[in-house]
Amino acid sequence: MNQNLLEIKNLSTSFRIGEEYYAAVDDISLDLKENEVLAIVGESGSGKSATAFSVMGLHNRAKIEGEILFKGRDIANLPPSKMNKIRGNEVSMIFQDPLTALNPLMEIGKQIGEVLLLHKKNMSKEERRKYSIELLERVGLPRPDRVVDQFPHELSGGMRQRVIIAIAIANKPELLIADEPTTALDVTIQAQILDLIRELKDDLNSGVILITHDLGVVAEMADRVAVMYAGQIVEIADVESIFVNPQHPYTRSLLSSVPATDHSEDRLHVIQGIVPSLKNLPREGCRFKARIPWIEDAAHEEDPQLHEVSENHFVRCTCYQHFYFKEKSKGEQANGVTES
Ligand SMILES: Nc1ncnc2c1ncn2[C@@H]1O[C@H](COP(=O)(O)OP(=O)(O)OP(=O)(O)O)[C@@H](O)[C@H]1O
């Protein structure tokens, strides 16, 4: 893994509600290397998709601040004419729901052809068809010469997702963003699709941002993990550190809902509550504070920062040092040191 393919610096993405803008993504910084998989995890509403859409330039009316450096070039706020040249070409996205991402009235081959037309203008109609069939074969669809003339409703969910992937890789993207790519699929198909994404990433040497709330998928696929809560990154580290040595109470809470973590004592200690709505996000202090009211105020920082707790392992707010699950009595804590 070499130089940074993508560097997000102090990105904030804000949506207008009434008269004011509210940041759904609030000052986040991330980087991604070639052939690396960075998973972004967090509950619904934590800002994962808003981050991905910012990179793809897909927000219509959002205010985007900060830098999104793709191969060193800032692509945040590029005019549509310039972003259209990058999107679907060097940077591509696999969406969650193939039914809504595909046009129900258009044959699969034509849908692939549209992306090719945008970026490979000198390909003839025959060449586009031939290449579409090759792509469908590459993503493991049986009888690609038939699928190319079919409509989305004639395919199963897993086949449709393979078509979406074929479209996403048509122009050999260097950066691939997969937003919950397997959520709509049943478990055996999920595993096949994940294998396919990994294979294609290796073939193309692409960097992948994988957005998911499924920690099984993360364990399977990711090299590094960023945990988002309420628009901020609360923990970021390599995948092993996240699973073996999670620090932030939110990360530990997410992991405790997964069987088979090493944190057997943490099991069933799921923290109640949800991410507050955008308008009601706490903007000062530790955003997770309200969900761990049994932790004393002094444990939190006034202006929580990311702390490097070990090499390349960052955690937000000092509360991680004093965190314990509610059911445990404080007496069981070793002088405020994180239980694990
Ligand atoms: N276009 C929009 N206008 C106003 N608010 C928005 C818009 N898009 C997202 N939001 C809000 O921004 C916050 C973050 O949303 P986002 O979709 O990024 O979350 P997420 O972590 O991807 O959740 P999910 O897993 O459900 O997709 C939420 O409070 C959401 O309601």
Image (spheres, helix red, strand yellow):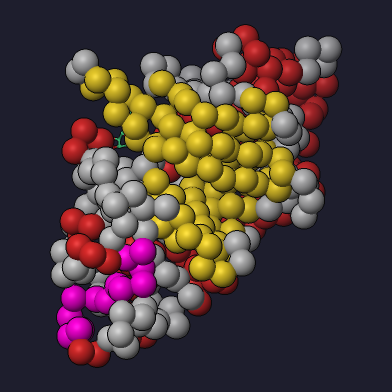
Residue shown at the point (52%, 29%) measured from the top left? 66
Q: Quadrant of the image for the C terminus?
A: bottom left
**Nearest to the observer: residue 7 or residue 187:** 7
Residue shown at the point (83%, 12%) measured from the top left? 122
Residue 285 against residue 121 in the figure, above or below:
below
Residue 225 shows in the view? yes
Residue 240 against residue 186 in the figure, above or below:
below
Where is residue 60 drawn, in percent x and y? 42, 17
Residue shown at the point (16%, 64%) measured from the top left? 293
Where is residue 262 drawn, in percent x and y? 45, 83
**Nearest to the observer: residue 142 or residue 112:** 112
Where is residue 55 drawn, in percent x and y? 55, 31
Where is residue 132 drawn, in percent x and y? 73, 30
Side of 35 relative to 221 (left or right): right
Residue 17 against residue 249 in the figure, above or below:
above
Side of 241 relative to 126 (left or right): left
Residue shown at the point (20%, 84%) measured from the top left? 330
Q: Which residues are magenta?
A: 318-330
